[in-house]
Image: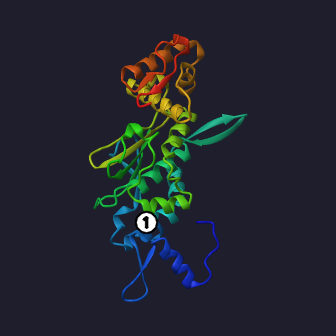
């Protein structure tokens, strides 16, 4: 997974594993597998009492509620060795739409895989491992995906896009970065928002139920069916994404984001005004002409 040559001989392999704190010398002789080693590379996490409740649960429901479960699966492999299989399994359960491109029918997943990968990696890496009796969970509904992990975030949910990374589990985060599963640069949510905008899906929602962090991805919804909160969230995250790439939210950029035709500029202006009134974005220059207005997130 590190894409480096295997150390020469058993002793060198054990030394390399010890150097990354995946195993430790046992006083009685031999080696102990650390919690970090078990969490990342176990073939069956249940065999390690310290981390067995930390396996990712994937639950697939019928409809939009939790009353009818279609399938439930506990991914017992370690996070590093089982990550690709976990994402593949999730994407196989995600509903798909058929689109026609150049006379060819193509099946497209309802949610972009990159966004799902980033949020799953975040849930695994940033969970509070000291919370007992609970672990990360991903729930698939007909109209959304909810990804929940134990522990409240170390930064405000409104600042997920621009805040430098803070990790509870530095050892796991460092190794997962070296395995190219995460970047440890704080850009994961940026990628999620960018992918959601490319697919023109409703903006993701981040919430903090007591003791947990939850990220929600929504399936495609016509603009006419979005409520005010969804429109404001879309404008705010669009402004955040523009800000971290040294740009601004404008009438033209929000029209492109929401799929609004140019002749409906007034509609885009109304949505921008809603976000300003809610205090999520602000004008860059209040004295600028209306057709030249640019906007920033409230924290800029």
**Counting other residues with Cα less than 10 Å from the Cα at mark 1, is it few (<14), some (14-19), or many (20 or more)?**
many
Q: Nearer the viewer, residue 65 or 18?
A: 18
Figure check: 70 above or below 297: below
Q: Give coordinates of residue 211: x percent, y percent.
A: 28, 49
Farthest residue, direction bottom: 29
Look at the numbered disc 1 and give the secondary structure of its residue. Answer: loop
Q: Give coordinates of residue 14: x percent, y percent.
A: 52, 80
Q: Nearer the viewer, residue 3 or 227?
A: 3
Figure coloring: rainbow
**Which of the 4 image quarters holds residue 214?**
top left
- Name the residue rendered at 53%, 10% in the picture: 289
Q: Give coordinates of residue 102: x percent, y percent.
A: 73, 34
Quarter of the image that includes the N terminus: bottom right
- In the rendered image, which residue does mark 1 sit on? 76
For the image shown, how many numbered marks are present on the structure? 1
Farthest residue, direction right: 102
């Amino acid at each position: 997974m590190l894409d480096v040559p295997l150390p020469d001989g058993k002793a060198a392999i054990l030394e390399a594993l010890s150097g990354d704190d995946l195993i430790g010398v046992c006083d009685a002789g031999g080696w102990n597998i650390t919690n970090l080693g078990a969490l990342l590379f176990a073939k069956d996490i249940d065999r390690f009492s310290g981390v067995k409740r930390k396996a990712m649960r994937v639950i697939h429901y019928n409809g939009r509620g939790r009353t009818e479960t279609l399938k439930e699966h506990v991914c017992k492999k370690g996070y590093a060795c089982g990550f690709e299989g976990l994402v593949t399994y999730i994407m196989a359960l995600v509903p798909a739409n058929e689109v026609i491109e150049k006379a060819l029918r193509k099946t497209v997943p309802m949610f972009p895989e990159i966004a799902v990968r980033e949020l799953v990696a975040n849930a695994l890496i940033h969970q509070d491992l000291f919370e007992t009796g609970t672990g990360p969970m991903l729930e698939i509904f007909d109209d959304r995906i909810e990804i929940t992990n134990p522990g409240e975030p170390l930064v405000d949910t409104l600042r997920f896009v621009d805040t430098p990374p803070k990790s509870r589990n530095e050892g796991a985060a460092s190794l997962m970065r070296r395995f190219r599963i995460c970047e440890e640069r704080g850009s994961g949510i940026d990628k999620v928002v960018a992918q959601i905008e490319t697919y023109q899906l409703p903006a993701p929602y981040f919430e903090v139920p007591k003791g947990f962090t939850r990220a929600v991805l929504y399936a495609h919804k016509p603009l006419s069916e979005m409520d005010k909160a969804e429109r404001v969230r879309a404008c705010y995250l669009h402004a955040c994404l523009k800000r971290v790439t040294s740009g601004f939210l404008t009438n033209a950029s929000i029209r492109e984001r929401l799929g609004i035709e140019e002749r409906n500029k007034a509609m885009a202006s109304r949505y921008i005004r809603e976000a300003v009134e809610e205090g999520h974005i602000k004008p860059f220059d209040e004295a600028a002409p209306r057709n030249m207005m640019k906007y920033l997130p409230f924290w800029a």
